[in-house]
Image (cartoon, rainbow, N blue to C red):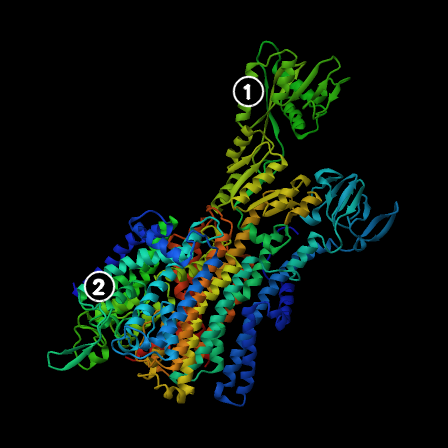
Amino acid sequence: MKKDKSASLFQKEQVKESLKQSFVKLNPRIMIKNPIMFTVEVSTFTMLLVTLYSMGNASQGSFGYNLFVFIMLLLTLLFANFAEAIAEARGKAQTDSLRKTREDTPAKKIVNGKIVIVSSSTLKKGDIFICEAGDIIPSDGEITEGIASIDESAITGESAPVIRESGGDKSSITGGTKVLSDEIKVLVTTEPGESFLDKMIALVEGASRQKTPNEIALTILLAGFTLVFVIVCITLKPFGDYTGATLTIASLISLFVCLIPTTIGGLLSAIGIAGMDRALRANVITKSGKAVETAGDIDVLLLDKTGTITIGNRKATKFYPTQSNSMDVSFTDFVKYCMLSSASDDTPEGKSIIALGHENNLRMRDLDTTGARMVKFSAETKCSGINLADGTEIRKGAFETIRMMVEEAGNFFPQDTKQQVQSISKNGGTPLVVCINRKIAGVIELQDIIKPGIQERFERLRKMGVKTVMVTGDNPLTAKYIAEKAGVDDFIAEAKPEDKMNYIKKEQNAGKLVAMMGDGTNDAPALAQANVGVAMNSGTQAAKEAGNMVDLDNDPTKLIEIVEIGKQLLMTRGTLTTFSIANDVAKYFAIVPALFMIAIPELSALNIMHLHSPESAILSAVIFNAIIIPILIPLALRGVQYKPIGASDLLRRNLLIYGVGGVIAPFIGIKLIDLFIGLLF
Amino acid sequence: MNTELIGIIAQIVLMVALAWPLGKYISKVYKGEKNWSDFMNPLENSLYKICGIDSKEEMNWKHFLKALLTLNFFLFLWGMLLLVCQSWLPLNPDGNSSQSFHQAFNTSISFLVNCDLQHYSGESGLTYFTQLFVVMLFQFITAATGMAAMAGIMRSMAAKSTKTIGNFWYFLVRSCTRVLLPLSLIVGFIIILQGTPMGFDGKMDITTLEGAKQTISQGPAAAIVAIKQLGTNGGGYFGANSAHPLENPSYLTNMVECISLLLIPMAMIFALGFNLKRKKLAYSIFAVMMFAFLVSTSINVYQEMHGNPRLGAMGITQHGGSMEGKEVRFGSGATALWSSATTVTSNGSVNGMHDSMMPLSGMTEMLNMQINSWFGGVGVGFLNYYVFIIITVFISGLMVGRTPELLGKKVEAREMKIATILALFHPFLILVGTALSAWMFVHASGYVAGEGGWLNNPGFHGLSEMFYEFTSSSANNGSGFEGLVDNTLFWNMSTGLVMILSRFIPIIGQVAIAGLLAKKKYIPEGAGTLKIDTATFGVMTFAVIFIIAALSFFPIQALSTIAEHLSL
């Protein structure tokens, strides 16, 4: 289930299965879902009848010619079916590896307080089971009791085990993963067959695939084009009668099939499936195809600072003891005090203070903590620290907290430390003030480390027209500094969960589409409110329910990839539509002179490609029309490359490649095919 | 340089130069901003009062359409009634008879839909009463109807999010009193000075220089000629339209009338820019339309001024170009320009016979009408273009990887459905109509013979004549390849039906799209938004419009005009 971009587009078994499906999909009841290809099917059937008729009667052209046209039309259908089938097969290959994790595993279900071994497939929503070290977790659920380390590599491909525990935001577990240590009690949260993975599998395999709004609108346009060509071809018969030209059914049908947008019509569903497949390859489970499409339209992206913009948590980077006379403390002493204050502090910040102490050649074991009493951080005191055996009280905390504590004790706050605090804040750091016996000893600087390469990604997003917003609990000064350094466009500082929600609503009221990523239960309302809400797989069940995508990698920068996948999806449809319609110009110049050249010799002046004969001209056009579909399958599956160069430039670029290219390519293609056919006849 | 070419260039430059300030003024008129024509206020207010109209009432798109359609329905009945009774009505000094039922059906629809296809000749087919109270009345009101529809669409495009698109009656009345009426007075005055009649006397009996006796029709011509040119109507007072010496006496009147053809259609595009405060958008649309107009004009001027190769082969020198069906006082160049101007707009008046023009000129004339959105009819021309903008926005939006938006409104399945139907409806009517007539010509020759055989020219040109008739009807243009014997049951009924469908279905659809889009949430422009006022988008729109028309009509053009050209 790891990304494997080097994998070839066509794998042997997939191709085999797809070939079979190409025929199965000829069933008119399946075909009618795609109105464009359905008209081709009707045409093909008509040609079959004409071919049979021409066995005994040459008024509709020779048997060989009719048979050839029939075969080419059939191939056109099969190629289109193959495109859809191969896209499905690729999606299926992805989901199969997911499904393996769903295979029946024994579950230790708790029934009336006793453990009963049942099959995982019988687990229902609301059941409770137990998992011990070495067990495969039988179903998605939420831990109700206990803590365990879990190997999620089967889903994410990430080998480092993760910790999951009851309560809080890390309580959700996924079926198919393995418990490595400890024991947990788990509440089943989904009915069998309704988990995200099941939904995704159904989506890719076509069972529950629904057309997205853009796809519907495009289908309407394409159906319109088809309809006009129905009229063009039918009315051609009376015009032919008037001018005395006899038109065979084969030539009219060839003209029709060549003109209708079969290229995009045949590839349309493959493009849609491939879009979801690409999302899946990026380890993102989408709950609907629409979500992927919406992702391409995103205007505003809400990103958590921690883990997305900065690496993990803040780190202590420097000690600043005060120089004030009131508190005579040497640098080494200050570092010692700082380390003592963090002796029992197992927050990442606390640990980093100890680590920074080590860099200054001080060891924890050198410090005397016998008889000391640890003071943990609490909401009331808003500081933590230690009371040493000799009665020394060391406290560290935010500037305001410590200032109040010190000033209440009647001591003053030294000027140099105050300045230090400000300069740390201004540089994006977080100051942690340390006091000893309610006298200021100095300040520790904590810094955020911005992820390498993140600036480039934001620059890319800006060019795409996406505004990035950093969400952080930091104070506005720090937030501003980091926002500028990382290159985000806006930030929400000192963010509470409802701030995210309000920001999203504000942007949406201005007509913007907002995407965000979250994992906690308190993110759930915002995830639901956002147009694209990506929940991390490690997040709570509530978060996963609220979002419309789940990221299996728990990688917050994934949103950027999702936006590009969405854009690619729309672009592929747009460019292939343009290409398909542009192709018609050349096809006209091949077929129209061929239809009338015999009755109206003057019209051979329109045969600008100098095609060999009327029959070879029509056949070349039909052959070109058929083989362009398989030629474009790789493009449909991979998607048209997105370049963030601005909408107008992008339009110009795609118009040149697919519009102008679409006019020229068939002239060359048809001429080449005609040269080849000319050799045969 | 050739004086004929100088005349052509002068007319085109004047059109654009006059259209710009007029556009600015029209924008003010629809916005209700202060301007010099406010002295019309009391007149308009008393009109609203008499009709019991609240001109301040804001209408949603459905109410707007209801008002539009109701008015048109009653006008249709009014027209029918007067035409079949005209022989008994006053102002009939020449004693012209009433129209037959099917001819009245055709005529009433024809003027109602701003098409002005004429299956009669003005001298004998109408009376002064019906000339004034059917023809002229309709020429004002139907032109104003199209302009009012565009004003409603402009209102919807300008607003960020709105349920209403303005008041139909307000736009209608103001279009008449403040745009069409003043301009008609100016144009009418100029042509009266040049000799166009304006009176109620019957036919004149005169003795010619050679001593022969001749009767000359006259009547209230100048009033009708002015509005027929300005309102993209095109229905001539006399049968020969503006080729008639009394309808278009001199090169000067020809210039004035030709400029009048395009004046308001061009001004409406500028008005759009001023009204929406998006001048760049208007200029880019104008540039696309102007480009198409110049190309079609160039082809026609070249074709006509170079003469007919068949005549050349006979050793006949053609210094004046191809002069068949043209007036010596205008020359082939001015007629070529007019033929292009009258078909890019849905006017349809002529100053020479299109039937006699070179085949490729016929092709561009038909192509202009088949596209029907290069300037087009007053108001409705832009409406047609608007449909193509929707389609272009959709395709190009997808091409840049974004759900398509038009001026901050998402274009979705419902709008696409309407736009697709509208874009294809026009080719549908033309192709099916022409196919039906071609089929009948071959397979129902008995019936056709009973209607006079229809065609005066066999072969490719005959197909062109039928093709042109349906094209002109569906484009609400009204010009014709007059070699066709068209005052018959088949042609009156079929073209009547085509005209009425091709007028009201598009207007309903276009106003509906605008109304639906107006209601949607406004999305502010961002860096990822596709701008529609750029050259790239203009080129894309041109390509979409041209390709749809080319794909629909290439086969039949090949069999008619192109085949005729190649066999010259």
Q: Disc number at residue B255?
A: 2
* Viewer can see residue A609: no
**Direction from residue A184 to residue A483 in the image, left or right:** left
Q: What is the number of callouts on the image? A: 2
CA gap, disc 2 to disc 1?
A: 83 Å
Residue A661: % across, % down = 42, 62
Which quadrant does the N terminus of chain B fall into?
Answer: bottom left
* Viewer can see residue A447: yes
Instruction: Determine which quarter of the picture holds residue B238.
Output: bottom left
**Direction from residue B528 to residue A437 in the image, left or right:** right
Q: Circle 2 — which element?
A: helix
Q: Is residue A500 above or below residue B449?
A: above
Q: Disc number at residue A350?
A: none
Identified by mark 2, the residue type is Met
Q: Which residue is mark 1?
A: A420
Judging depth in this view, the residue of A471 and A643 nearest the camera is A471
Chain letter of disc 1? A
Residue at left offset 49%, top offset 80%: A250
Residue at left offset 51%, top offset 63%: B417
Residue A618: % across, % down = 45, 77
